[in-house]
């Protein structure tokens, strides 16, 4: 089962793609967004000054780059916590949990 991304995961995906500047269509495909969601997030992220239009391209602003660094750190911490949870469950029960088996 595929889980849905939360808002900050989508922000991170959009910011990753816009570091070098990209057109909307390419952004839509690389960030894996529908056109309607793309428009929603582009408007929201422009309002937050995370991205901007520059010569027909959407580009991450300096503030967007700082936000991306924080999102990357959050992803690393989150991944480490999941690994610790997995290790604890394996130590307690001697095997992976059902949840771990379905997420792999």
Image (tube, grey):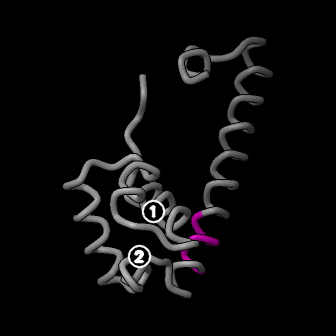
Query: Magenta span covers which residues?
Result: 66-71
Q: Say how many tags the image has.
A: 2
Residue at screen point 46% across, 51% down: 30
Say if 33 sits above or below 27 in the image: above
Which residue ends up furthest to the front in the rendered image? 55
Q: Residue 70 in magenta?
A: yes
Q: Is residue 53 shown above or below 42? A: below
Q: Quadrant of residue 51?
A: bottom left
Q: Residue 25: where, in percent of width, then height?
A: 34, 57
In the image, 32 versus 50, the foreground residue is 32
Which residue is labeled 1 in the image?
14
Q: Which mark is residue 33?
A: none
Residue positioned 73% across, 12% down in the render: 95
Depth check: give the residue in front, 69 or 25: 25
> Up-down: is 9 above or below 56?
above
Disc 1 to disc 2: CB gap under 8 Å:
no
**The disc label shown at residue 57, or none:** 2
The quadrant of the rendering that contains the C terminus is top right
Figure quadrant of residue 86: top right
Horizontal and vertical percent for residue 74? 61, 61
User: Above or below — where is 24 with respect to 75?
Assistant: below
Quick check: 62 left or right of 6? right
Q: Position of residue 3 (x, y in %)?
A: 41, 34
The N terminus sits in image quarter: top left
Q: Which residue is nearer to you in this view: 55 or 52?
A: 55
User: In the rendered structure, does residue 39 fall within the stretch colored magenta?
Assistant: no
* Dot 2: element: strand
How far, Cα to Cα, is label 1 from label 2? Answer: 13 Å
């Amino acid at each position: 089962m595929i889980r849905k991304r939360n808002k900050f995961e989508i922000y991170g995906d959009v910011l990753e793609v816009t570091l070098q500047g990209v057109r909307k269509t390419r952004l839509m495909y690389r960030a894996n967004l529908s056109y309607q969601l793309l428009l929603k997030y582009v408007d929201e992220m422009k309002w937050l000054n995370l991205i901007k239009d520059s010569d027909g391209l959407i580009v991450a602003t300096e503030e967007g780059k700082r936000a991306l660094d924080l999102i990357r750190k959050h992803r690393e911490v989150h991944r480490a916590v999941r690994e610790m949870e997995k290790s604890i469950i394996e130590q307690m029960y001697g095997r992976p949990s059902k949840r771990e088996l379905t997420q792999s």
